[in-house]
């Protein structure tokens, strides 16, 4: 089952979510101890990947706004 001490995914920075996701993938690749643990890891990994995607999409939007702003100034 998922660790109750794990922070809420929504509160994680991109780097925190990415680093935890790497740990989840590593543990899954090595073979988690039980099916229940594997499922909990998979669910946490999906949430972490979604959080990373949110951060990346936000960064992309900020870059596009900055680019449009610099093109308008030119």
Image (spheres, helix red, strand yellow):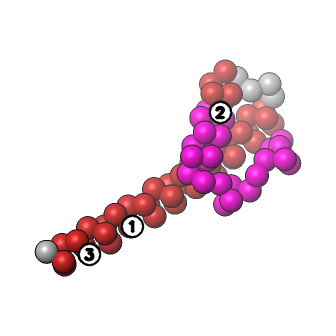
* Image coordinates for residue 58, horizontal then vertical, percent: 46, 64
In terms of image quadrants, where is residue 68?
bottom left
Q: Do the residues under discs 3 and 2 have CB atoms within 8 angstroms?
A: no
- Which numbered disc flags the more N-terminal residue, 3 or 2? 2
Q: Is residue 41 above or below residue 28?
A: below
Q: Residue at x 79, y 35 (%)?
A: 37
Q: Residue at x 71, y 39 (%)?
A: 41
Q: Which mark is residue 69?
A: 3
Considering every residue shown, the one lying at the far bottom of the view is 72
| Residue 66 visible at all | yes
SS for dot 2: helix
* Image coordinates for residue 54, horizontal then vertical, percent: 52, 60
- Which mark lies nearer to you, 2 or 1? 1
In which quadrant of the rendered image does the N terminus lie? Answer: top right
Q: Residue at x 69, y 46 (%)?
A: 44
Disc 3 and disc 2: Cα gap in Å? 39 Å
Q: What is the crowding at mark 2: few (fewer than 14 residues within 10 Å), some, or many (at least 20)?
A: some
- Which mark lies nearer to you, 3 or 2? 3
Magenta residue span: 1-25
Disc 2 and disc 1: Cα gap in Å? 29 Å
Q: Which mark is residue 23?
A: 2
- Which numbered disc flags the more N-terminal residue, 1 or 3? 1
The residue under label 1 is 62
SS for dot 1: helix
**Prevailing secondary structure of the magenta residues:** helix
Considering every residue shown, the one lying at the far top of the view is 30
- Which numbered disc flags the more N-terminal residue, 2 or 1? 2
In terms of image quadrants, where is residue 42?
top right
* Image coordinates for residue 10, horizontal then vertical, percent: 66, 60
In the picture, measured across the screen, residue 1 lies left or right of residue 23, that is right
Q: Is residue 65 above or below residue 43?
A: below
């Amino acid at each position: 089952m998922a660790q109750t001490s794990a922070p809420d995914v929504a509160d994680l920075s991109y780097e925190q979510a990415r680093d935890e996701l790497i740990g989840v993938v590593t543990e899954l690749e090595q073979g988690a101890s039980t099916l229940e643990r594997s499922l909990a890891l998979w669910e946490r990994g999906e949430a972490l990947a979604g959080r990373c995607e949110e951060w990346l999409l936000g960064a992309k939007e900020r870059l596009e706004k900055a680019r449009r702003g610099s093109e308008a100034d030119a």
